[in-house]
Structures are given as structure tokens and as C-alpha cells.
Amino acid sequence: MAQSFDSQEIVMIIFFLALPLLFIIFKKSLIKHQSDDPPLPPGPKSWPILSTINHLLHPKTDHISLSHLSQTYGPLMHINLGSQHLIVASSPAAALEVLKANDRVLSGRYAPASLPKTPAQTDTLSFWADSTSAHWKNLRTVCRAELFTGKALERSARVRAEKAAEMVAEVMVKSKEGGGVAVDVEKMVFETVVNMSSNAYFSKDVDVAQFAEMLRGIGEIFTAINLSDLYPFLGVLDLQGLRRKYMGISMKMWELWKPILEERRERMDLRHNDFLDTLIARGFGDEQINHLLEDLFTGGIHTTTAVIKKTMIELLTTPTAMAKLKEELSAAAIFDGQDSIPDLEKLPYLSACIKETLRLHPPAPLMLGHRAYAACRVMNHTVPKNAQVLVNVWAIGRDPAVWEAPLEYRPERFVSGGADFKGNDFELLAFGAGRRICPGMSAAVKMVDVVVASLLSFFDWSAPHHLHLHQLWNRETSQFNAPLLLIPTPTK
Ligand SMILES: *[C@@H]1O[C@H](CO)[C@@H](O)[C@H](O)[C@H]1NC(C)=O
Ligand SMILES: *[C@@H]1O[C@H](CO)[C@@H](O)[C@H](O)[C@H]1NC(C)=O
Ligand SMILES: CC(=O)N[C@H]1CO[C@H](CO)[C@@H](O)[C@@H]1O
């Protein structure tokens, strides 16, 4: 195996060598626009492609690099990204222009090249589907009118309560082992969120370890800096084999619910009160159901888990907030009632804590990319047709012009009113806004609420000696670079 390259590597190398040339050609051909149009938004004029790959497009930190750039170039920036135009909105006013004033024309989806099909080719995709297609509109109606209504969420409250109780039972066992056994909180929360989701979708548990592996694979594909995303004409070649890999994982995931789907179709047995029943009753085809469930899982599990994990870290490193929340939880005694479903409405301070986490640590800091169906005008600048449009929700949540002491974790700012995340307040956009707002928003927040309320109602948590939370937690970058190991002690 010593010094030989395989043919794929050689093609890659040739393309890398040719990149600077391609970059110049594309820049020349694409930046031309009619002279009476307003100019493109300001931005770094020529962003050398290789340094783009090294410094800008790092999946875990690109929102941070883009925040720095926006301090120089302003709330609406233009960046050349390979052969693409990238537009980034970084203030509430710019976000409003993108997600409200120009919602229709900018609601295209910027689908990654690793996706097996493009939105235009299919009426089976869900998150990636074309927002002008009849299929997508139908899907949105079903989400709004059936899957995520208040009534549906009430129905699934029992599932969430049961799965939260299972988690508490599991921690209780550990806490009684003595000797201060630490729990991997992130791992356990991940499992709980998977359990809640699979039961709300199709009333069954899945093998969590196998499932985690699939999500990890898909996550890698979507965050891989992929040549084909920068140079779409390379897409057909699938140089990195991402599309093939993605297909493989998708198929495996679909197998998880295939027998359940088949059985229900065969018997027309639709009495489970879950997502799958609703989708079958509404005439969705197998492939449409597969894509929707896959997108709900891939979009919902890691994000929800991250919000819970970061709320726990923030509370453990902000003792005043933790004390207030503990007091609220013990006064409300939501787990003591006859009804096994806790009333989370009684917890305004918890809700403020979650909002504060979403402000500082939005789980999708740049949301999913939008695409311009046509050229349009935003803040006296031109957004070219087909440009990728990102809203830097992360930067907006920390904008000192909007938030007082933005880097402090202060749930109090949301206690008496303040912004909400439902898509009307452009300073708090954790779930986006407009047509492409996250459909699972309320379901996700309910999962976060019940898990955090359970963890903190039943236990006091402390870090083992060797784990220095303050040193491991970097609020400025939202990074916590270690497993979150915490010792539970049953609350007196
Ligand atoms: C998730 O469900 C599985 C299967 O029922 C169960 O074994 C596991 O304990 C649950 N996880 C948690 C954290 O409750
Ligand atoms: C756009 O230009 C018009 C006229 O030149 C000006 O009145 C307006 O304030 C500008 N709007 C923005 C958002 O800069
Ligand atoms: C530039 C580049 O090729 N980046 C990444 C593309 O995706 C693969 C994974 O499939 C990474 O290994 C590369 O580093």
C-alpha cells in the first residue's frame, strides 16, 4: 500500500491544483450583474479557497468566524465560496429582511451535495423538499394541523412523562450504588430523547446504540466540508463517496420502522395515536414517511440533547440561577400529583432558563442554509439568484446592541416577558422563522422542559473532583470539551 494513489485520490489532487483557476473563472462569470441593480452586500473581496477550507468552513466554528467577519463587513455580508455566492445575515434587522420581508423568494433549501436526490427531482424529501412544491405544502399542513398541534403534544405528554420517569429510575439506581458514581449525563439524555422520539413517532423503542451510530454517520456526512458543495458541477462525480455512504445509512435507518409500517398497512390498524398512524391515514407513501421520520430524527435528537446538556452546564456554573430554579421546582412539586403527567406550565423560571440557553447556544447556529429562488433586494443590496443564504442566529443572540451583558447567563431577562423563540422576535431565532421555521419546535422544547425538570427535581448534581466545569466550559465558544460526568445525589 506504500506510495500508490488510487484513482479517486488522483482526481482529487488534480481538482485541488486547479481550484485557484476555477475560482477566478467563476468569480468573473458570476459576479456580473445588471448595472442598475444595487451592489452585492459588502464582504471580503477575494477569499482564497484554501484558507476558506482551513479557517472559515470548520463545521464546529464557522458561525464564530462569520461573526468576526460581520464585525468588519456589517450585518449583511457577501462571500465567494468556491463557485457559490454566500450571503450571511447577522443582525435582527437583516434576519427580518431574509426570513420575513423576502421569506417566499429566499425559502429555497440549500441542499448539501451528499443528498441522494435534489429537491427538484423528488416529491418524497421533507426538510430538503422544494418549498414551492405541492408535496412540501401538504407536509407543512400536516405538521401544523396534526403532528405538532397542542392536542397532539398533549397526547404525547404521556410518552414523555413515562420516558422521563424511566430515566429518573435509572439515575436513582446509580445514585444508590454509593461512592459517588458519576453518570454520563449527555449519553443518558441522548438515550432519553431517542426513547421519547421513537415512541412519539411509532410507539416503539429502538436500539439506541445502533441508532447513535447511524446519527453519528449522518452527522459526519453533513458537516464534512465537501468539495461538491463548493463546486456543484463536481457533484455528479461524488468524489468523496458521501452520497453513497449517506444512502447506506438511510436504508439502515428505514429498516428500523419498516416492519412496523408494513404491519400497520397490512392490518389497517391505526389506533396508536402516533405520527405513523397520522401519516398513513393521510395517504403518505412509504418513501415520504421514511424521509420525514429520518429528518425528524436527524434534526431533532442531537439538537435537543445539546440544549439539555448546555442548560445543565450553565446552571451548574451559575449557582444563583440553579438555586432559583431548584426553589421553583420544589415549590411547584410537579411530580407529586395524582396525574402522572407533570404540569410544566407551572415553571416560568425553567422556561426562562431554556430561552437563555437557546439565546447563547442555539443548537443550529447558522440554521439550515436557505437558497434564493430568484435575485432579490435585501437592505439595499442584491442577493443573486441561487445564492446560499445563512442567518447567523448565534451572532444575533450575542449582539451587544440587542442584549445587555450578552455573555452572562441571566435567565432573569426572560422572566417577565421578553423575546420568544416562536419566529416573531428576530433577536431570538433558535428555531428560525417564516416558512422554514422548525416544525418540531414545541415538541423539542417540551422534551427539554421535562428532562431538565426531572433531573433537577429528583437530584442534586455535582462534578467529580477531577472535573473542573468552569475550566472545561467555554461559554464564549459554546464548547464543552469532555464527557459531562456528574454525580447525582437524591434531593432531600
Ligand atoms: C430507553 O429505552 C430502553 C429500551 O426500553 C431502555 O432500556 C433504557 O433504559 C431507556 N433509557 C433511559 C435513559 O431511560
Ligand atoms: C435604502 O436606500 C434608500 C434610498 O437611497 C434609503 O432611504 C434607505 O434608508 C436605505 N435603506 C437601508 C436599509 O439602508
Ligand atoms: C476538503 C475536504 O475534502 N474535506 C473533507 C470532505 O469530507 C471528507 C469526509 O468524507 C473529509 O475527510 C475531508 O476532510
Image (spheres, rainbow, N blue to C red):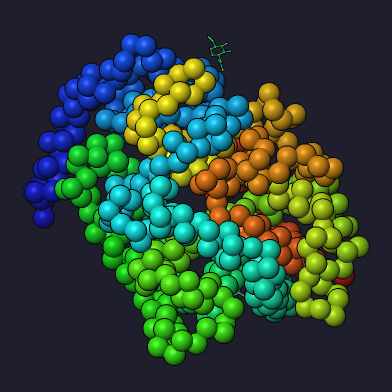
Q: Within the image, what quadrant is residue 166 found in?
A: bottom right
Is residue 51 in view from this perspective? no
Q: Residue furthest front?
A: 134
Taking the image as shown, residue 226 lies to the left or right of residue 276, namely left
In this rendering, the answer to whether 422 lies above or below 125 is above
Q: Quadrant of the N terminus?
A: bottom left
- Comparing 488 with 417, the one in front is 417
Q: Within the image, what quadrant is residue 490 found in?
A: bottom right
Q: Residue furthest right?
A: 331
- Comparing 255 with 490, the one in front is 255
In this rendering, the answer to whether 201 lies above or below 216 is below
- Comparing 189 with 139, the one in front is 139
Residue at coordinates 34% horizontally, 22% vertically from top-left?
47
Q: Quadrant of the C terminus?
A: bottom right
Q: Within the image, what quadrant is residue 289 found in?
A: bottom left
Residue 358 lies, in percent from the top left, at 65, 46
Residue 461 lies, in percent from the top left, at 74, 61
Residue at coordinates 67% horizontally, 38% vertically from top-left?
425
Residue 491 lies, in percent from the top left, at 83, 68
Is residue 230 in view from this perspective? yes
Residue at coordinates 69% horizontally, 28% vertically from top-left?
402
Taking the image as shown, residue 54 lies to the left or right of residue 463, namely left
Residue 302 lies, in percent from the top left, at 52, 57
Residue at coordinates 59% horizontally, 62% vertically from top-left?
145
In this rendering, the answer to whether 483 lies above or below 409 is below
